[in-house]
Amino acid sequence: MAETTETRGTTFTKPDDTTLVATRIIEAPRDVVWAWHTQCDLVRQWLVGREGWTMPVCEIDLRPGGGYRYVYKGPDAPSFTMSGEYREVQVPERIVSTESYSESPGETLNTLTLTEEDGRTIVRTVVEYPSKEVREEVLATGMMDGWAESYDRLERQLREMQAA
């Protein structure tokens, strides 16, 4: 049976030993949410995890075979890099990519799906880890809280944009 946890409006499910599924409903149209996932000037504003973190480097080459690289810097922590290769890109609904971190073993396969419903977007990310041990090691870092906090930040940014 799948284990499910809700963190700050984001639902995390472990459907099996090596997979994590994150689901969040964003109050914005899919095209807007897509842009905030794929354009560096926008990504840097929200996809930084915990409060106080920044992304001094953001590179995105959004095409199959292209790649991405994000360098994160925390207030009291060394910087680290997240990077990967795009395997599949279906604008504006789906991205399949690999992901690896400079300080963690293994590579994940991630599938991001954006589904629009009544002007809102269901953001669903499936992360396939190389093993249960790697998944649990990553989750022990507080990754779910940082992920949910990033989505909180995205929603604040979108509300501010809509109010302007």
Image (cartoon, helix red, strand yellow):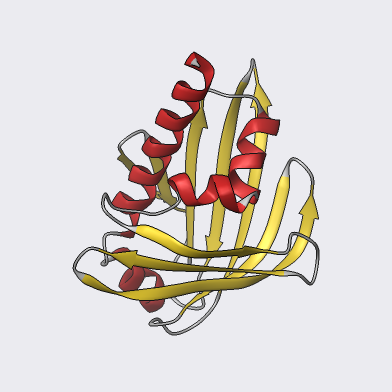
In this view, 71 is above or below 25: below
* Quarter where residue 108 is shown: bottom right
| Horizontal side of residue 113 vs 107, given as left or right | right
Residue at figure coordinates x 59%, y 53% from the top left: 40
Q: For this rendering, which residue is in front, 33 or 130?
A: 33
Identify which residue, 116 or 130, lies in the foreground. Answer: 116
Residue drawn at 38 percent across, 50 percent down:
147
**Vertical placement of 67 versus 25: above or below?**
below
Image height of 41 relative to 82, above or below: above
Left or right: 19 in relation to 51: right
Please name the residue shown 64% across and 25% down the image: 29
- In the rendering, at what x and y percent does residue 160 appear? 44, 23
Residue 135: quadrant of the picture: bottom left
Pinpoint residue 17: horizontal percent, then vertical percent. Answer: 44, 67
Q: Is residue 14 left or right of residue 70?
A: left
Q: Is residue 93 left or right of residue 6?
A: right
Q: Position of residue 153 (x, y in %)?
A: 38, 38
